[in-house]
Image (cartoon, coloured by chain):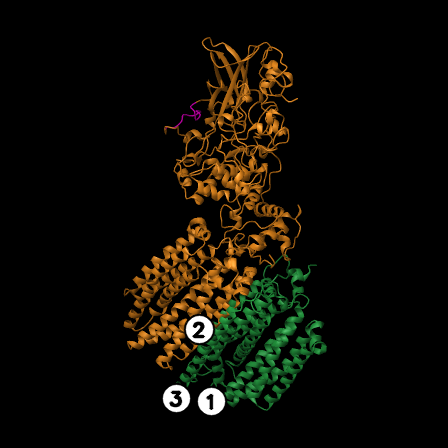
Chain colours: A green, B orange
């Protein structure tokens, strides 16, 4: 039986302390996760709500459909830094896992391209360019195939990612692929796989629901829309209840050494879980009382805590083999400074664009 | 080595990255150039108040959005995925080194997306000034992302100072950064026009359509000159080795470079034609052509750029296989199978050899060679090799071509890989049984004890061969020089050369070499006229007179035409010649003897050049083998041997390469033939001992000739004991090459490792005349071992010092007269009849040993002798 440690490649040195790299990764990852949840959840909601009677108003379905391609663009873009930084800190695990499932991992590109085009096609077929066109009726039947395809593909994509990231942190599961790496090796026997996937799916629906509620509350689609708000909050509430079960399932499916960290063995991890629980309860209460903004803030808090818990799990799973402090530091901070400066400039440009966008939007409304 | 290898088989060899990368860059460069196009066209439309053009800009922006954001963006991520799947080690290095440059590119990408979304979705509702600024923001950030990625990609080809300093700024601001960014910018503008056509030709408003199509034509045509100029700048910025590959050193690159150079002007021309007012359907077809050509243009450029890095992924730092150069030494010692954890087999045995070879292939070859697929299919490329040939090619991998990495594993792994490549892929097994020569009829000539004369004869070359593939190239004429010495017995004996006439006659089965050799169909004499059949290079036939040399009294018949193919059938590399001495005038027969005159076509080229033996499965250079030799020679040297062969006037090697054996001084520009052949092939035959020699020369102990058969073999010596190992042998020839060909000699010498002595201590030698001197090992004529252990590096001064011509201390009797031919010194064991080479000793002293051995002086002396004036005798 091959020792998994023998299967792990050596990593090149890093140019800045690993904490900086991880900090950057997690910060952008949180944004990516928010966008991704809205994308995946939104697509699922649109898939269900399009072309049939629904408590979600037609114009909201249409506006949601209209927004999805842009949300996807943001999701993909925000996914780049996490993809980059995970290769710097955990590359030797991530690459190996990717190679084992190479064909499936590579399929992500095709899956996303098709999903993306399906979202655009759905947007047009369901009558883009205003609130005038009907959501149901002549055009509606034809448009559901694209949104359903997109939603299915995005769910498939989520599954592929869950496979890869689960396999990344389980070197013991790689031994079956030694000597015959055909690119189709999936960690289907890993007990965390399905709970993880369910956890993400349900979470996506919850977050997307909450985003819809916010849109209704803040009048992003049209003027303040209480029906959309109510729909979104309801979806968030029930999905979050389901998420509590899914989360528990996810926790117990972890190996004992990892799950017990959250149940007392590690003060930090236990505090995180407790905080997540508290925030969840708060969010549920806010949702019940239709306090959308506080609910959104609490949800954002939950996601942030979850991102941190996710890292605790990863560090725990990889502890027998690796910790980021094992990486050799050969300081070369110049490029990091360059990046920081460019980021400032870039964010400035985006701020200008956002202002210009809004100004033009208001001008359009006034005209 | 540390990562699992994705076993792609037919889809290996880099096919995936080639497809995904070329598709991405096609769209991505459009995304950069197209941004400027949108902004400038919008400027133009607003300035000239052209609503139709402005409407087109919006439509084009939508096309732009759909194509570049979705397809362009995601295929970019696709490249990233693919390189980490195919080359994880090198990717890890790039990512770790340039992480914040990648991050900077992301910032540009993020601003790009935001700007493009705003540009499109607020097209009608934004103020003109703000909208244009949005467009400029897009344009600048798109170019910025090109710049950052361009820096990292160009680093891989020209790492420049980084190799010494390891500094990331040296790596980013590398020698080809600016040229590549210039070329890519020009290409981006060009592709903006190509893609621009797609929407421009469908604009409804006729005036607007013509304006826009003409505008796109300028974009698609004008940058061609900038692409060309920056391409030359780019080429100039490459390291000499990479540049040499692009400029013909690598035949695959030549193909793609050709596509690139042809696409440019054709595309520009098509773009200009598009500007002419043509019917819609015609324009649509032309648009399609420009589109395809545009892809071919940038695709071929990227292919050349990638291939120019060979054999590296990061030139000088990481090989194409992912192995870091710094780690190569350790991996060579430990082996590739144990370097990482992902191999099934760690130890090679006889039973798992082919499977081990397959694993080694995946680690060390799959990165560039598919198995049965379109990318440098290894199945096709290895079809011609024998097991030994494959082992040799792997040993010298990259040295001759310059674009393959050295084989990184142990010798045992190299053998296992060779087994996989020959037996595993082609089912070729090494021959189980050696060739079994049959005993040929032999009659030992009789000599009366009280005879007046002793006639001895020998072949100048006991070991010789020639190629019988004259229809493809002409290497050497069939022939061997016969020498003889007539001694009048007495007290003292006399060497006789006056008043006698010596003649020779080949046995009947050897008197018609032209019946089975093609030489005379293509041979030309020095004057340019064809040689009559069965005439040797010096004008002699299969029988004739021998002429005495005044100084030495040795009778000689030069270049007697002799063939190993007996007529009417059969193989006989050792035909017999009868030599007779007759009194001048009366013609009275004074003495006669029989001697072997060897001939062989057992040239082992087929080990690496493929093809079967030409004749009887025993020897001969087949047309297939010769054809491959000609093809490889043409490819490497830009010659036209194959064409000339096809036209019926095959080239002779000595047209270009000076060759003392075939005659001729060559064209004065190149290495002499021996230096060229040995200098080149030594790179792959290094370290193989005698096998290096016997894989080409007819001394293979299992072959049909086995020409190395004399007393030295019996005493356990091999070729290399006198001639030196292959590297040393080749280096001595290369160092002997002064003047013309010097540069080539130096280049070939750089591939070789001197083993016996240091390079500057290797004494230069000219082929054929500077040979090992017997007295190096036989110090003062002592037995072997009384002097040096090796004959290497001490050469005869000239041809007169050669064993076949030399004489004893009295300068009377030729050494070979008593000792036999070189490589067949008495007692020799001939594979076609044990004593076939020992005829004169048996004739004159009934003992297979040098004449006069064991007190047998009576062979020539009528008085008893108790000391030797010929040379000191062993005690």
Q: Could you tell me if the residues under marks 3 and 2 are in contact, i.e. CB atoms within 8 Å?
A: no
On the image, which quarter does residue B214 sit in? bottom left
Magenta highlight: main SS: loop
Q: Residue at 47% across / 44% down in the picture?
A: B747
How crowded is the residue under tag 2: few (<14 C-alpha within 10 Å), some, or many (20+)? Answer: many
Instruction: Give the SS element for disc 2.
Output: helix
Tell me the chain of label 1: A
Q: Residue furthest bottom?
A: A289
Q: Are marks 1 and 2 on the same chain?
A: no
Can you tell which mark lies on residue A366?
Answer: 3
On the image, which quarter does residue B530 sit in? top left
Instruction: Give the SS element for disc 3.
Output: helix
Cα separation, mark 3 vs mark 1, equals 14 Å
- Which comes before the other along the chain, label 3 or label 1? 1
Q: Is residue B510 left or right of residue B211?
A: right
Can you tell which mark lies on residue A223?
Answer: 1
Q: Is residue B628 above or below residue B492?
A: below
Magenta-drawn segment: B529-539
Q: Is residue B803 above or below residue A234?
A: above
Cα separation, mark 3 vs mark 2, equals 28 Å
Determine which residue is flagged by label 2.
B112
Q: x, y (%) of residue B792?
A: 56, 34
Q: The N terminus of chain B appears in which quarter of the rendering?
A: bottom right
Q: Is residue B38 visible?
A: yes
Q: Is residue B644 left or right of residue B509?
A: left
Q: Is residue A203 above or below residue B223?
A: below
Residue B533 among those drawn in magenta: yes
Q: x, y (%) of residue B766?
A: 48, 33
B396 and A44: which one is in front? B396
B777 and A65: which one is in front? B777
Q: Is residue B58 above or below residue B382?
A: below
């Amino acid at each position: 039986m091959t020792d998994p440690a023998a299967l792990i490649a050596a990593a090149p040195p890093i140019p800045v302390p690993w904490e900086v790299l991880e900090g950057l990764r997690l910060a952008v990852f949180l944004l990516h996760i928010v966008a991704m949840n809205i994308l995946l959840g939104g697509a699922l909601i649109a898939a269900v709500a399009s072309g049939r009677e629904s408590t979600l108003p037609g114009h909201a379905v249409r506006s949601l459909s209209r927004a999805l391609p842009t949300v996807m663009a943001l999701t993909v873009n925000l996914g780049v830094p996490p993809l980059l930084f995970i290769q710097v800190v955990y590359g030797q695990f991530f690459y190996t896992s990717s190679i084992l499932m190479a064909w499936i991992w590579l399929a992500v590109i095709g899956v996303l391209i098709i999903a993306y085009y399906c979202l655009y096609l759905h947007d047009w077929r369901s009558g883009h360019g205003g609130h005038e066109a009907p959501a149901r009726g002549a055009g509606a039947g034809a448009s559901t195939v694209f949104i359903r395809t997109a939603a299915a593909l995005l769910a498939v994509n989520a599954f592929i990612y869950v496979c890869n990231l689960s396999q990344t942190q389980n070197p013991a599961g790689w031994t079956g692929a030694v000597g015959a790496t055909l690119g189709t090796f999936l960690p289907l026997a890993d007990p965390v796989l399905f709970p993880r996937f369910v956890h993400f799916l349900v979470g996506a629906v919850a977050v997307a629901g909450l985003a819809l509620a916010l849109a209704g509350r803040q009048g992003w689609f049209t003027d303040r829309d209480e029906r959309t708000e109510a729909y979104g909050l309801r979806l968030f509430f029930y999905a979050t209840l389901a998420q509590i079960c899914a989360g528990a399932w996810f926790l117990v499916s972890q190996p004992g050494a990892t799950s017990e960290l959250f149940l007392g063995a590690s003060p930090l991890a236990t505090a995180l879980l407790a905080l997540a629980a508290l925030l969840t309860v708060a969010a549920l209460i806010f949702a019940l009382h239709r306090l959308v903004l506080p609910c959104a803030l609490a949800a954002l808090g939950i996601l942030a805590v979850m991102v941190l818990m996710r890292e605790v799990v990863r560090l725990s799973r990889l502890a027998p083999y690796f910790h980021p402090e094992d990486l050799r530091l050969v300081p070369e901070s110049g490029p990091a400074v360059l990046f920081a400066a460019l980021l400032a400039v870039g964010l400035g440009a985006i701020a200008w664009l956002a202002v210009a966008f809004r100004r033009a939007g208001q001008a359009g409304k006034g005209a | 080595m540390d990562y699992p290898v994705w076993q792609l088989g037919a889809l290996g060899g880099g096919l995936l990255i080639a497809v995904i990368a070329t598709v991405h860059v096609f769209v991505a460069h459009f995304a950069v150039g197209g941004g400027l196009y949108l902004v400038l066209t919008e400027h133009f439309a607003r300035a000239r108040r052209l609503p139709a053009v402005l409407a087109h800009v919006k439509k084009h922006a939508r096309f732009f959005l759909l194509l570049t954001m979705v397809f362009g963006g995601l295929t970019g991520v696709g490249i990233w995925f693919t390189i980490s799947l195919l080359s994880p080690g090198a990717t890890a290095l790039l990512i770790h080194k340039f992480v914040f440059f990648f991050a900077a590119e992301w910032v540009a990408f993020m601003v790009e997306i935001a700007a493009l979304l705003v540009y499109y979705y607020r097209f009608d509702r934004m103020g003109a000034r703000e909208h244009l600024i949005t467009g400029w923001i897009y344009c600048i950030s798109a170019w910025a992302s090109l710049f950052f990625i361009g820096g990292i990609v160009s680093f891989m080809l020209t790492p420049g100072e980084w190799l010494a300093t390891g500094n990331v700024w040296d790596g980013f601001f590398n020698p080809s950064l600016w040229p590549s960014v210039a070329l890519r910018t020009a290409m981006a503008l060009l592709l903006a026009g190509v893609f621009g056509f797609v929407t421009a030709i469908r604009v409804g408003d006729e005036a607007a359509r013509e304006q826009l199509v003409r505008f796109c034509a300028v974009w698609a045509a004008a940058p061609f000159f900038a692409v060309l100029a920056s391409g030359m700048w780019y080429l100039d910025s490459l390291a000499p080795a990479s540049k040499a590959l692009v400029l013909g050193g690598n035949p695959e690159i030549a193909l793609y470079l050709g596509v690139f150079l042809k696409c440019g002007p054709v595309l520009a021309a098509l773009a200009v034609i598009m500007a002419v007012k043509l019917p819609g359907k015609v324009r649509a077809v032309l648009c399609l052509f420009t589109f395809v050509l545009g892809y071919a243009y940038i695709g071929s450029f990227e292919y050349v750029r990638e291939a120019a890095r060979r054999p590296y992924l990061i030139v000088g730092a990481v090989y194409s296989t992912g192995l870091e150069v710094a780690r190569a030494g350790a991996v060579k010692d430990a082996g590739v199978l144990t370097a990482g954890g992902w191999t099934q087999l760690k130890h090679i045995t006889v039973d798992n050899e082919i499977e081990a070879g397959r694993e080694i292939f995946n680690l060390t070859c799959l990165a560039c060679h598919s198995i049965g697929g379109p990318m440098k299919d290894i199945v096709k490329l290895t079809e011609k090799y024998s097991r030994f040939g494959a082992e040799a090619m792997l040993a010298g991998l990259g040295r001759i071509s310059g674009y393959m990495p050295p084989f990184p594993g142990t010798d045992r792994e190299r053998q296992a890989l060779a087994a996989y490549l020959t037996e595993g892929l082609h089912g070729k097994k090494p021959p189980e049984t050696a060739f079994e020569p049959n005993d040929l009829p032999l009659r030992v000539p009789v000599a009366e004890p009280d005879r007046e004369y002793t006639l001895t004869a020998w072949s100048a070359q006991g070991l010789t061969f020639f190629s019988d593939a004259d229809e493809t190239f002409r290497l050497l004429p069939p022939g061997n020089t016969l020498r003889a010495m007539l001694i009048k017995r007495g007290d003292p004996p006399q060497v006789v050369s006056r008043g006698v006439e010596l003649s020779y006659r080949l046995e009947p089965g050897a008197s018609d070499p032209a019946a089975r050799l093609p030489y005379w169909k293509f041979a030309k004499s020095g004057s340019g006229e064809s040689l009559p059949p069965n005439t040797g290079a010096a004008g002699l036939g299969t029988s004739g007179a021998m002429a005495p040399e005044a100084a030495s009294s040795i009778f000689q018949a030069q270049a007697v035409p002799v063939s190993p193919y007996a007529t009417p059938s059969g193989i006989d590399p050792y035909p017999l010649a009868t030599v007779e001495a007759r009194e001048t005038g009366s013609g009275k027969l004074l003495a006669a003897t029989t001697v072997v005159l060897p001939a062989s076509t057992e040239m082992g080229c087929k080990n690496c050049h493929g093809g079967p033996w030409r004749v009887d499965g025993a020897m001969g250079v087949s047309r297939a083998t010769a054809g491959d030799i000609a093809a490889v020679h043409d490819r490497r040297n830009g010659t036209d041997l194959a064409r000339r062969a096809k036209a019926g006037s095959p080239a002779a090697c000595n047209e270009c390469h000076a060759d003392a054996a075939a005659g001729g001084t060559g064209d004065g520009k190149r290495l002499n033939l021996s230096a060229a052949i040995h200098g080149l092939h030594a790179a792959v035959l290094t370290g193989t001992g005698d096998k290096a020699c016997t894989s080409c020369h007819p001394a293979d102990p299992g072959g049909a000739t086995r020409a190395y058969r004399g007393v030295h073999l019996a005493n356990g010596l091999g070729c290399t004991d006198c001639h030196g190992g292959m590297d040393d042998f080749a280096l001595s020839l290369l160092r002997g090459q002064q003047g013309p060909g010097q540069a080539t000699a130096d280049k070939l010498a750089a591939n070789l490792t001197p083993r016996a002595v240091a390079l500057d201590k290797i004494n230069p030698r000219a082929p054929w005349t500077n040979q090992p001197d017997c007295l190096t090992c036989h110090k003062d004529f002592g037995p072997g071992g009384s002097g040096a252990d090796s004959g290497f590096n001490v050469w005869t001064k000239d041809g007169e010092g050669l064993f076949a011509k030399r004489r004893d201390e009295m300068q009377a009797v030729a050494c070979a007269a008593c000792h036999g031919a070189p490589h067949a010194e008495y007692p020799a064991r001939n594979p076609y009849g044990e004593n076939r080479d020992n005829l004169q000793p048996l004739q004159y002293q009934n003992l297979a040993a040098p004449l006069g051995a064991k007190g047998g002086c009576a062979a020539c002396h009528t008085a008893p002798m108790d000391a030797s004036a010929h040379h000191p005798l062993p005690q």
